[in-house]
Image (cartoon, grey):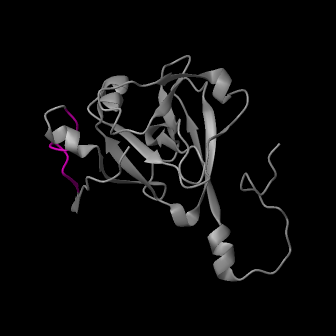
Amino acid sequence: MQDAEEIGQDTGSTAPQSKDVEDAKATKTLTARCFCKAVHFTITVGLSDLPLPVYLCSCSICRHTHGAMSSFRTSLPRGVIPRFIAPSTLEGALTSYVAEGEDKGTCPSSQMFFCKTCGCHVGDRDLVPNPRGELEWRVRSSVFDDHGPQAFRIQGHAHADMATQGVGGMREWLPSIGNRTMTGAGGG
């Protein structure tokens, strides 16, 4: 069972804290659902992490599993993982797939999760821990209820080099948003 502090709830602590410490601990909970609502989860992130950077991923894995030129995804901040809301569970509501794509070497080895009912691709979790021993998550920003600029900001293209190699992607059609040039960073 998670303690209240771990899931971003007020622990009732009365210890005096400076304004900077309080601001550093301030969080926002974002809610996500698939199309049929069988998958329902939240993430709690620090206000200092918002807006979460969104990348349009053009790797062959994302293009083929989504049937689109790119997918919109964000990497969750360190230590943040989806918290599923009953009756939705990682094991119960989702099915998964480990991609063996042509560009597997450019994408981290990850397990992709899809709703068992409607097929919505809600996110990916790495199969290999990062140097801190954590399995990192990337989630699709389109499944969140709050799409506002305070929650998410399209930052750039991931695997943009693949789009310039004639394998597809959005980079050539979406080089900028407003007056901001889209970066080619973001990795897998």
Residue drawn at x 57%, y 64% is 47
Q: Is residue 174 left or right of residue 118?
A: left
Q: Position of residue 2 (x, y in %)?
A: 79, 47
State the extent of the magenta-drawn residues as a range. 168-177
User: Looking at the rendering, in which quadrant would you find the N terminus?
Assistant: top right
From where the camera sits, is residue 170 visible? no
Q: Position of residue 153 (x, y in %)?
A: 39, 55
The quadrant holding residue 108 is: top left
Which of the two residues, 22 or 158, is positioned nearer the viewer here? 158
Residue drawn at x 64%, y 80% is 20
Q: Is residue 57 left or right of residue 127?
A: left
Give the number of callouts. Answer: 0
From where the camera sits, is residue 107 visible? yes
* Magenta-drawn stretch contains 172: yes
Residue drawn at x 59%, y 27% is 37
Residue drawn at x 49%, y 40% is 139
Q: Is residue 149 left or right of residue 135?
A: left
User: Looking at the rendering, in which quadrant would you find the C terminus?
Assistant: top left
Judged by its main secondary structure, the magenta piece is loop
Q: 125 above or below 101?
A: below
Which of the two residues, 52 or 136, is positioned nearer the viewer here? 136
Q: 100 above or below 168?
A: above
Q: 102 above or below 72?
A: above
Q: Position of residue 169 (x, y in %)?
A: 22, 36
Residue projecting furthest to the top: 117
* Magenta-drawn stretch contains 41: no
